[in-house]
């Protein structure tokens, strides 16, 4: 006889939402995670009174009212608005690309002048149907902004030349002919007060959690504990890479405490030249309007994923897409295993989309 209705593999957002909803439906869950802490990649750790985003900046933003109401059951959110700054060899520009950016770049003052400048550069480049990321970016923002603020950053992030990357990657690029510095055009936005770890702990309250527990190493005995498994780890690892490894980009962080109250005056500064080895610097205290006497910064370095690294961004090209589809077919044949989340579905998910997907699965599974 199994001891639990569900074994949830992974104590990140997807797993925590499923465990919370299962408990509400009167089901028993055991949540396990191979890491020594809960919260997956949204894990925050306190340093010098500052909640540090250990696995990179996570800013909650959504237009989904159901998801917003859901997360507010487990945390109070502040009014943080993401307004990053781009640093190109000491020149500072507003992100998203807006009238402040265009004024600094070209001296234009009106939206009409900015639009005309972009159109002029797009025509000069001769782009009608963008075939790759470089052409897509130039068609959106012109050559000058592409060269200074897109090219170097994107090539560092993906480890590939922009003309070898698919155009769709940069369809998310916000371009505004207004003086609006709000990067995410979302109805709801903020950071949970007290950090994400506290929010996830509230979701998992009353559910048994075992940390430092690697499902794939002890699959047989762990699976025997429950009627069904909710698996949020890498789908290719579940099948022992039998069809080959899916590709990811990874990120490495160098975090340090500085004996000063303010390092860069903003939560996120992107370094958009190719020569600077890091992609951006995060100053964590500004996520919660900190007044601490010290500050904590993290430099982010993008890298090609290799076994042992943390997988962050799926490389959603044609080759990996086909391989994932083959793994998905195998997954559908697993009778008592549900696959979900960023790694289980090989999909780049914003936090709100992860929660929405988990709630959808709960509706299907728990009724």
Image (cartoon, rainbow, N blue to C red):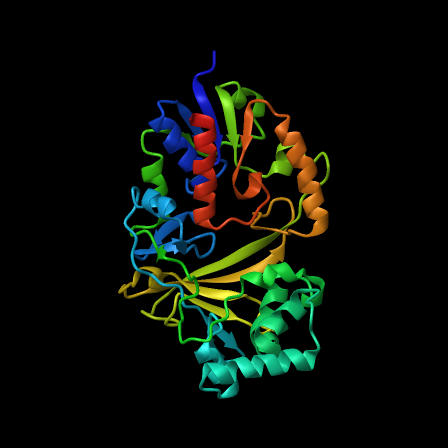
Along the line of sight, which residue is nearer the eye, 134 or 11?
134
Residue 39: quadrant of the picture: top left
Whether residue 41 is visible, yes or no, is: no
Residue depicted at x 73% and y 36%: 243
Name the quarter where the C terminus is drawn: top left
Whether residue 269 is visible, yes or no, is: yes
Task: Point out residue 211 in the picture as x, y percentages from the top left corner.
Answer: 44, 34
Residue depicted at x 29% and y 42%: 73
Residue depicted at x 44% and y 79%: 100
Task: Point out residue 327 in the picture as x, y percentages from the top left corner.
Answer: 67, 36
Residue depicted at x 36% and y 29%: 207
Say left or right for 353 vs 236: left
Depicted 106 relative to depicted 316: above or below: below
Task: Point out residue 281 in the picture as x, y percentages from the top left corner.
Answer: 47, 66
Depicted 70 relative to depicted 157: above or below: above
Query: Residue lying farthest bottom?
Result: 107
Along the line of sight, which residue is nearer the eye, 170 or 346?
170
Task: Point out residue 187 in the picture as x, y percentages from the top left corner.
Answer: 36, 57
């Amino acid at each position: 006889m199994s001891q639990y209705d569900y074994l949830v593999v992974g104590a990140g957002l997807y797993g925590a939402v499923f465990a919370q909803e299962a408990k509400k439906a009167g089901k028993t869950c055991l949540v396990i995670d191979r890491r020594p802490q809960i919260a997956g990649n949204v894990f925050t750790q306190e340093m010098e009174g500052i909640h540090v985003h250990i696995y990179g900046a996570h800013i909650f933003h959504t237009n989904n009212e159901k998801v917003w109401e859901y997360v507010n059951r487990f945390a109070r959110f502040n009014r943080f608005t993401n307004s990053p700054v781009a640093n190109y060899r000491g020149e500072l520009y507003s992100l998203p690309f807006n009238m402040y950016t265009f004024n600094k770049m070209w001296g234009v003052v009106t939206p009409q002048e900015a639009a005309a400048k972009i159109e002029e550069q797009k025509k000069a480049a001769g782009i009608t149907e963008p075939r790759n990321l470089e052409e897509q970016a130039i068609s959106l923002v012109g050559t000058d902004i592409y060269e200074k603020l897109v090219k170097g950053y994107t090539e560092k992030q993906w480890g590939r030349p922009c003309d070898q990357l698919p155009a769709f990657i940069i369809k998310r690029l916000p371009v505004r002919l207004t003086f609006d510095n709000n990067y995410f055009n979302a109805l709801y936005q903020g950071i949970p007060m007290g950090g994400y770890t506290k929010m996830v702990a509230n979701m998992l309250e009353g559910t048994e959690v075992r940390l430092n527990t690697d499902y794939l190493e002890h699959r047989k005995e762990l699976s025997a504990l429950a009627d069904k498994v909710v698996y949020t780890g890498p789908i290719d690892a579940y099948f022992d890479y039998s069809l080959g490894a899916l590709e990811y980009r990874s990120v490495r962080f160098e975090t340090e405490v500085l004996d000063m109250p303010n390092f860069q005056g903003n939560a996120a500064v992107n370094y958009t030249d190719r020569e600077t080895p890091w992609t951006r610097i995060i100053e964590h205290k500004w996520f919660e309007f900190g007044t601490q006497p010290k500050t904590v910064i993290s430099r982010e370095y993008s890298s090609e994923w290799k076994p042992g690294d943390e997988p962050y961004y799926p490389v959603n090209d044609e080759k990996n897409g086909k391989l994932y589809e083959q793994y998905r077919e195998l997954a559908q044949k697993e009778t008592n295993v549900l696959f979900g989340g960023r790694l289980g579905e090989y999909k780049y998910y914003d936090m709100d989309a992860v929660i929405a997907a988990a709630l959808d699965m709960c509706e299907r599974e728990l009724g």
